[in-house]
Image (cartoon, helix red, strand yellow):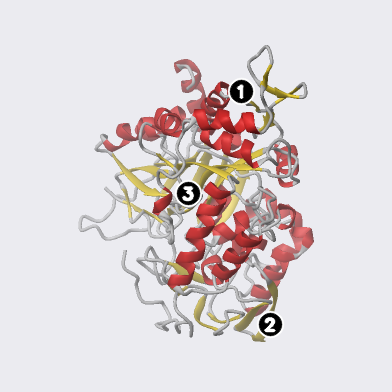
Amino acid sequence: MSARPHALNIRARRPRSRLVRLPLLAAAATALALTSACSSGTTAASPGGDAAGKPVQGGSIVFAVDTEPVSFDIHASPQDITGAIQRNVFDSLVSQSADGSFHPWLATSWEVSSDYKTYTFHLRHDVTFTDGTKFDADAVKANFDHIVAPSTKSQYAASLLGPYTGTQVVDPYTVKVSFSQSFAPFLQAASTPYLGFYSPAAIKKYGAGLAAGGPDDVGTGPYVFAGYTKGQSAVLTRNPNYHWGPATAAHQGAAYLNQITVRFLPEDSVRVGALTSGQIQVAAAVPPVQVQQVTANPQLKAYAGKAPGAVYSLVLNTTVAPLDDQRVREAIQRGIDLDTDVKSVYFGVNQRAWSPLSPSTPDYDASLEGAWKFDPALANQLLDQAGWTGRDSAGYRTKNGKRLTVEWPLMPQQYIREQRDVLGQAIQGDLKKIGVEITRPRLDIGTYIAKVYGGKEGIADYSWARFDPDVLRLYFNSASEPAKGGQNATFYKDAQLDQWTDQGEATLDPATRSSVYQQTQRRATVDLSLIVPVYVDNVTIGATSKLHGFHLDPNTWADFYDAWLGN
């Protein structure tokens, strides 16, 4: 989609340095669950549409997703689903197009210092929060300061601000954001909803209550967060005063749809069944086994794209025995038959991964493909070398009378995406064959977060949607501590990984970034066995063919701003 001129007709001043370019039930049970989940009366109310295809305003849709956010607070939550939903409610300083370039949004223009330590943004003068307060320089400062405040307990947004030292209000509509060291990825970070803006009055009034969602979440976006019913739905209603859409959008002004009801339907069969029967209009996370069912239906459309950023991986905690021994980590990596496991669960739609970085992300290292294959003989040899030579009655390896056991906890079922629990069973089976016991206790979400981020678990598993290779810094730089909003659940401290990811953070030079990020991928995966990249998520969203103007953004999230209902 080509970018349209900004509403103010002001072009963004290019940064003075190089512009970067870059989340089965039985039949009777299924029917019951579907009736319960979709019986609120919220269905598509099509305004008819224009015969020539001209967008029209009106109508409501139901958008079914497979996971429910633990927290709706964009400044605290690390979840893709939080960003995907709240993108409709919260705007950003800049927008990013599919080619990776940046364009105006709440900022009309910006300058970047040659050392990437300061970013000066010139803001629109006509933006208001949905509580009626003005969006201005003070609001930018209040939000960025809120993100890094210890009381916010940010699990992701704080890391997107990197070495942030503060925001200076230059005048009511000009801000200067400063960092203690060069921080080249900031523009990309500033395009994400996680660095979006709450009304300062809402931050002051609700604080930690922002996690609850609903009307307390006051943004400037095209939709208002009108209500939330835990376990069922979130309701977003059209913001009629919105006229400051991103320059990358196909139109300016208010969104076309009157209402979006986000349904939480974790059962794949229920979600896709609701789409094919017309009870909902958009379904996220269409499972690979049902993609053909959607694409073959003339009443539906499928939108697909490989998620950028970090692929779904097993992240190995190097501070917990026996994973503190690299031989054990490599044995686990080589003892999993990923080609077979990924194909059997995802039917060829999702491909097995070779790097922690997705192929759709800039600076992906394709040379890793085939570099570390399934090799149970090597895995057994490594475990023998590590001293795990005994076997107990169940066939698991032992050393000094202790079983070789690694704990990999499960979240509550409602937070598990893409049949990852099923895939986990296959991985457990593979590792049992080489004598490694993988235990999977089911933890409540609070305990899960506390133990994983506190470094108490052997294996964590997650992916991270972000259209920038700086995600590698979050995963492997020793300063990216989970307790401080980072994502380095390997807890490994390596001077070389720190140096490379620091270099990547400090420049937009393509040659430098390509070199350091590709070296980071190889060292983390092959040389140190810190991670087991598992699969690349080929995101598929199904929608009624009556929905027009809909697309996936660079993060492969559903973008409803230009969407409208027709024939």
Question: In terms of depth relative to the viewer, which is nearer, 354 or 226?
Answer: 354
Frontmost of labels 3 and 1 is 1
Point out the residue furthest to the left here. Answer: 52
Neighbour tally class for label 1: few under 14, some 14-19, many 20 plus, Cα within 10 Å: many
Quarter of the picture holding the N terminus: bottom left
Determine whether label 3 and label 2 are within 8 Å by CB.
no
Question: Looking at the picture, does residue 430 appear above or below residue 260?
Answer: above
Helix, strand or loop at label 1? It is loop
Question: Which residue is at 45% across, 33% downward?
Answer: 271
Residue 167 location, quadrant:
bottom right
Where is residue 104 drawn, in percent x and y? 46, 75
The residue tagged 1 is 435
- Which residue is labeled 2 in the image? 168
**The disc labelled 3 sits on which kind of residue?**
Ser
| Horizontal side of residue 474 vs 548, given as left or right | right
> What secondary structure is found at the residue carrying circle 3?
loop
Q: Secondary structure at mark 2?
A: strand
In the rendered image, the vertical position of residue 361 relative to residue 567, given as above or below: below
Q: Nearer the viewer, mark 3 or mark 2?
A: 3
**Residue 196 in sight in this render:** no
The three-letter code of the residue at mark 2 reads Gln
